[in-house]
Image (cartoon, grey):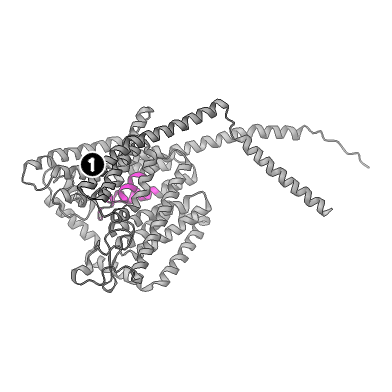
Amino acid sequence: MVKSKSKSKSKKSKTSKKGKKQSKQSEAPLLSLKEQLAQKRKAQKQRQELIQWLFMTLLPGIFLGAIASVVAEPKMGVIAGAIIPCFGLSYKYPRKALWLFLIYMPFSGTVVYMLGGSALLQLAKDGLYIPALIGLYQQCRREKKPFFVPQSIMPTLSICLVLSLLTLFFVNGLQLTGKESGQPFLQGVLGLKIFLGYVPLIFCAQHLLKSKKELLFCSRLHLGLAITCCLLGLWQYMMLKSGRCAGTDHLSGVELFKASLEARCYIGGALLYSPSQNMIRLPGTFVSPWHWGWFLIGNSALTFAAAFSDSSFLWRIGGLVGMALVFVNAVICGQRIALALVPAITILLLILTGQITNLKRFIPIGVGLAVLLGIGLAMNPELVQERIDSFKGRAEASPPQAFIQEQFEWANHNTKGLLGRGLGRATNATRTFGDISLVETYYPKLIFEVGVIGTLAFLAFVTHLTFTTFQAKQSVRDKNLRSFGSSYWVFVLIISYNTYWYPLDTDPVAVYYWFFAGVILALPKIDRQELRKQKLVEQQDEPEMQKNGKKKGSKPRIATPAV
């Protein structure tokens, strides 16, 4: 009897599995022969277009590469030969190019110096971004879809852009006729690109993220990038600590306190490692320690979003791991601003997103994070104490509020005219085109470059953007989507009014700020799409429920005779 029962159970389980498979197959839409042939023709056409574009771009690329290899060197020939195919394919496939742009950016510093540190390589990411931006705009025009969405932010953005162009033509342009050294107009063009060049990512993000699936892909992609880069940063530190990379501790004099490209350790760029002098500045995967510090600051918000907002338990655990790695790298990298802002932003996120009240989700993540950090701190108590002492010493020697006040006073005293001294005149990346003034805080730098009116216009634009993104994330009903929006919005809020140093001039914050503002603005549309899906599911379930009810109700009840 037992055997027969077990056999019957196994048969039932097999039949139930078969039934599930059949139901899944029945749920999948069956395509007619015409539709199948149409899909094959479409795929064949796409392959032919890809081959044509490769052929059209490879030939001029090979020609340009051959000239560059003869004139300069073979390595430059390879780089120059890859430019035209990269531009052409990015224009043809803009969405894929934008994803590649976001993936390449955290590793750009490592790629640049592994291939020789050429200035062309430093602009390689824009070889993906700019053609993709033009291609996406052209696609929207062909499909008769609006590219600049939402229109509500366009007035303040237009005013900011017009004032910047006035500075470019009437300040940088007129400097060509004066005694200014270098190439002030080209310096202004590059300064304008650094100032407002990544603003279109607001609109690109809304065309990239059309569903919840794509939003989760975006969050998980950035979590994977953060974990990978942080693991590489830990590996770099271990290589220096073990002596496999020399660092700068063997040098003497001023060289002990300066980041050097000669001291780079496998990944990233300029590095400073002089533990005997309590001086450590690690670049991670970026070109300099400064860029790496702001990567960690930005990812304190992105990993938090994955840890608290992802619908998958495993990805929330991954978010916890990412948060822990960001904390550890903030301690060992030597950047005081990362050591200060990473925990501060995490606390702000907990309060402003309301996750601190979500005890079911907060307590496991909080306990896990505390355990991981506790183990790390217990293993390196001296390192942690050195970082804290360094932070205190810097704050006492030059208090941030006094430093910012001095910078504002200097900018007001040295700015001439309503339109400023010229775009790029205080931007580090434009020094190849002319002399620059070192201004280490963002809004004083803007006052120096575009004047008080231009600075107020930019401040009005970012305030308008912050308010619009707040309205967008508040209108979302889905809890997970709203949680994503809250996490990204706190990051946008902090960067909008941060004047200490200049994160909006450097990667990756210059990209993450505008892109994730666009992600927030895309959430209401995704939310409406999810609501429509739920309604369709409910409408499909209603007839089945009614049929089941009729079948159950159709059976007559037979009264049992009393004995």
Residue 67 in the image, given as x and y percentages of width and height: 23, 43
Q: Can residue 345 be seen in this view?
A: yes
Q: Residue furthest top?
A: 34
Q: Which residue is drawn at 39% across and 59% down?
A: 230
| Residue 512 belongs to the span the image colors magenta | yes
Describe the element under mark 1 as helix, strand or loop.
helix
* Residues drawn in magenta: 488-516
Q: Which residue is drawn at 45% across and 44% down?
A: 215
Read off the residue under disc 1. Answer: 457
**From what the image shows, is residue 269 above or below residue 396?**
above
Our reading of the magenta stretch's main secondary structure is: helix
Residue 559 in the image, given as x and y percentages of width and height: 86, 37
Left or right of 433 on screen, residue 475: right
Q: Where, by quadrant of the figure, is residue 95 drawn?
A: top left
Residue 489 in the image, given as x and y percentages of width and height: 38, 47
Quadrant, the C terminus: top right
Q: Can residue 505 be seen in this view?
A: no
Q: Residue at x 37, y 56 (%)?
A: 345
Q: Where, by quadrant of the figure, is residue 141 drawn?
A: top left
Q: Residue at x 35, y 66 (%)?
A: 237
Closest to the observer: 66 or 531? 66
Amino acid beneath label 1:
Ala
Q: Which residue lies furthest to the right in this view?
A: 563
Left or right of 392 on screen, residue 434: left
Closest to the observer: 70 or 235? 70
